[in-house]
Amino acid sequence: MSANHVTPPTRAKSSTVAVIGAGIAGLACASALTQAGHRVALFDKARGPGGRMSSKRRPAAMLDLGAQAFTVRDNDFAAEVERWHNAGCVAKWPTLIYQASPNGWQTHHDGQTRYTGAPRMSAITRHLAKTLTAQGATFYSGTRITALTKTAAGWELTCENGDVLGPYTQVVISVPPPQAEPLVQPWDNALLAHCKALPQRSCWAGWAVFETPLPALPGVASDWQMARAQHPALRLISRNHTKPGREAEPESVSLIAQLDWSEAHLEDPSDIIAQQLFDALKSLFPAPLAFPKVTDIGAHRWRYSQPAEDADMPADGFIIGHEGLALCGDSLRGGRVEDAWLSGYQLAQALLEEGRSTASPR
Ligand SMILES: Cc1cc2nc3c(=O)[nH]c(=O)nc-3n(C[C@H](O)[C@H](O)[C@H](O)COP(=O)(O)OP(=O)(O)OC[C@H]3O[C@@H](n4cnc5c(N)ncnc54)[C@H](O)[C@@H]3O)c2cc1C
């Protein structure tokens, strides 16, 4: 376990809140509660924050293997993205999108403005985590929470290594619902039922790094940035080196697989998946075009990538239980970056309004 132990400022009426999961939803919730004067501890099983907005550092290139870009519709989220823009960790991208099939490529215009993290998607979540700890919150990275225990003093969190932390007056769980299930199961049947009503889809994400640029396609801008693929295995091609701040990196693509195909091949070895996604990419280029030498190839499995189409999402986009537990995350609102941020942010507002996070220890 590594913790950024910053001594929290003493504030009247502050309560201690544990936020499990440092994806964008957990960070949004933790930020709002910290700014309102509460003492927040944030936990993530990964080495850094980000979750499905994290980026993978490879020897020659930085790769985004989860969210590639996101849209903005809500006013509160727009104001937040403006703050990220001012902090220099977000930029507009992509502007050159295509629809790709073996029969040809067409430009794709849907009128949406999209943004990405700069110089990598995880720049946003790293900025949020850094700001949070500077404001007095504590971030425990590499800390998987395996169980919750309710005591007279409040909630205690058991970590994978056996450490017990707490007590906390409020616990916010922002992990995908199947991972939240074992945490809430002993304590809150209603939250458990919500988790079970939010099934998740799985998704493979491949990557390839090249020695030289991909061949130019006839009739397609050479600096195309993203392509929606019409292919049984491949859903999306994203050129990482066209993202703002990565211009000096070699050509690299992220290859996001179709959900049905991913689930049919979920337990296959990652090297086989990587090759199949690479073959799918090649099939979208006309036969005479020679591909450059690949210097790095691989695939990452997202077992919980997005909520299923039949997920029964709560009307509020978050859930407050009756025992000082609450759930947030993209799965409770819609499955996109904006949904995740709004779910965490609006949960924090609800907790603040109801005074739940300032209640006496349970
Ligand atoms: C391949 C892919 C492509 C995508 N493309 C887009 C896109 O183009 N546009 C868009 O808007 N969205 C996209 N998304 C969705 C977007 O990434 C998510 O909606 C968003 O990042 C979810 O954030 P979250 O905070 O709800 O969850 P997560 O990011 O999953 O955060 C949950 C965190 O909880 C941690 N955790 C889990 N269990 C525990 C535990 N027991 N203890 C401690 N920590 C734990 C995890 O490590 C993780 O960091 C994509 C997702 C994927 C996978």
Image: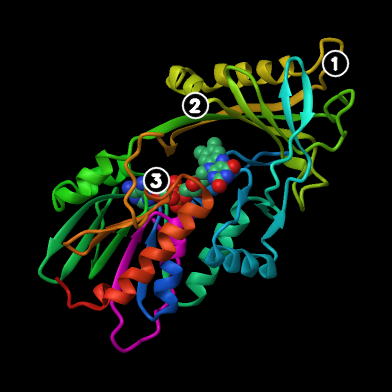
**Residue 48 visible within the image:** no
> Residue 136's spot in the image, x, y percent?
44, 77
The kind of residue on which mark 2 rests is Leu
**Residue 55 visible within the image:** yes
The kind of residue on which mark 1 rests is Ala
Disc 3: which residue: 331
Q: Is residue 235 left or right of residue 153?
A: right
Mark earlier in primary sequence (2, 3): 2
- Label 3 SS: helix
Region of the chain picked out in magenta, as a range: 1-29
- C-alpha distance separating marks 1 and 2: 29 Å
What is the quadrant of residue 276 in the picture?
top right
- C-alpha distance separating marks 1 and 3: 41 Å
* Disc 2 residue lies near ligand 1 with CB under 8 A: no
Mark earlier in primary sequence (1, 2): 2
Q: Which mark is residue 290?
A: 1
